[in-house]
Image (spheres, grey):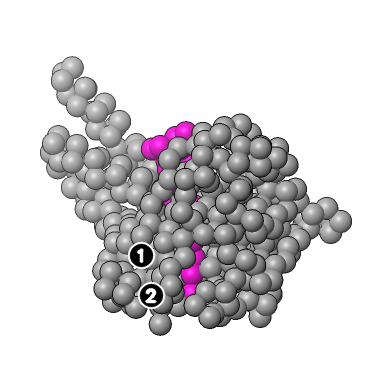
Amino acid sequence: MPKLVNKNVMICLISIPILVSCLFTLAGTFGTGFWLLDLTRHFPLQYLCVQIVGLVLLLKFKPRAYLAFGFAILILMSCNMFKVYAYYWPTDDGFMSSRQSKNAVQRLKILHMNVLVINQNYQAVSQLLQSTDADIVSLQEAGDKWYKALEEEGGMNQFPYRIMHLKSGNILISRIQFKRWEIIPLPESGNQQKVTNSILLADISLAGKTISLIALHPHIPLSPLYEAQYLKHFQELVAHKLMFSPYRILIGDLNTTPWSSHYSRFLNLMDLKDARAHQGFYPTWNTFFPLFCIPIDHILVTKHFLSIHQKVGPFITSDHLPVYMELGLIK
């Protein structure tokens, strides 16, 4: 009898996380238009891992009564596997093939870091800035203290061209001269006088083409109000679309993953693609809870670019990992 009780307890302990992952998979797959359901879309890799481990353990116990449950798990596993594997699926559209790197007329190296506003490890970030070969660097959550500290540490010395909105912590620095730059202020919803966020825009010249660089860090959509503010960022970008060159690169902590309904809709509206597509994805947040790490830091590009090389940077005592990408401007 104790063995039977123990077996039933084990099955229950295994089934609970599986059921939760299955419910969240269903909510994320079919729930659109509601902020809370959209939050469940960000963890397909975690759901997949729970479901694989759970199914293996259930098969070990071989409970015939759970055959239907196991079949349902397989279906939902396939759903999550498709979402994850879509980022590894080979393609010939120029974003995957290394052969097409030969068609790049010029390369552009980009580094993006959300440094975390309460982080005080200025030296680590400064050293990374000094050692990087990036042409363009986007810093987010970097306010007055960060800017002054990086100036003192010498991290900014290699980047003479800078635009910043320190109230929102957005800084864009470059080795390449800006042809034009602009700060698009983003007032808070319901208070047009209070500007707490911004979009940074800068144009550079690359191989005779004007390239628009856009740095963006929207609010986390954790409530209906925050979701409205979050969507305001993307609405502003779409409204200013004519200001941008057809050759566009968007950089930032977008507080969303590739599986969000907002994400795919925004890519379509702005004619952008994820530069990581078909080369895999790299989780960038949250470094303090690795099991729940998800990819929310992005470099998005138009069809004129391909990703030649990509990687995440070292731990800088932030909840985000730095993102480095080498892009090629194709013929």
Relative to 322, say whether 268 is above or below. Answer: below
Asked whether residue 267 is drawn in magenta, I would say no
Q: Nearer the viewer, residue 7 or 33?
A: 33
Q: Position of residue 76 (x, y in %)?
A: 30, 55
Q: Earlier in the sequence, mark 2 or mark 1?
A: 2
**Residue in the picture at 51% in, 39% down:** 127
- Measure the alpha-carbon separation of dots 2 and 1: 9 Å
Can residue 262 be seen here? no
The quadrant in which the N terminus is found is: top left
Left or right: 17 with respect to 208?
A: left
In this rendering, which labeled residue sits more in front, label 2 or label 1?
Answer: 2
Q: Which mark is residue 308?
A: 1
Secondary element at image label 2: strand
Could you tell me residue 126's position as x and y percent? 56, 40
Q: Between residues 74 and 167, which one lies in front from this camera angle?
A: 167
Where is residue 232? Give x, y as percent: 68, 63
Q: In the picture, residue 229 is in which quadrant?
A: bottom right
Circle 2/circle 1 CB separation < 8 Å: yes
Q: Is residue 6 left or right of residue 285?
A: left
Residue range corresponding to the magenta coloring: 284-302
Q: Depth check: 23 or 5 in front?
A: 23
**Residue position marked by numbered label 2 in the rendering:** 104
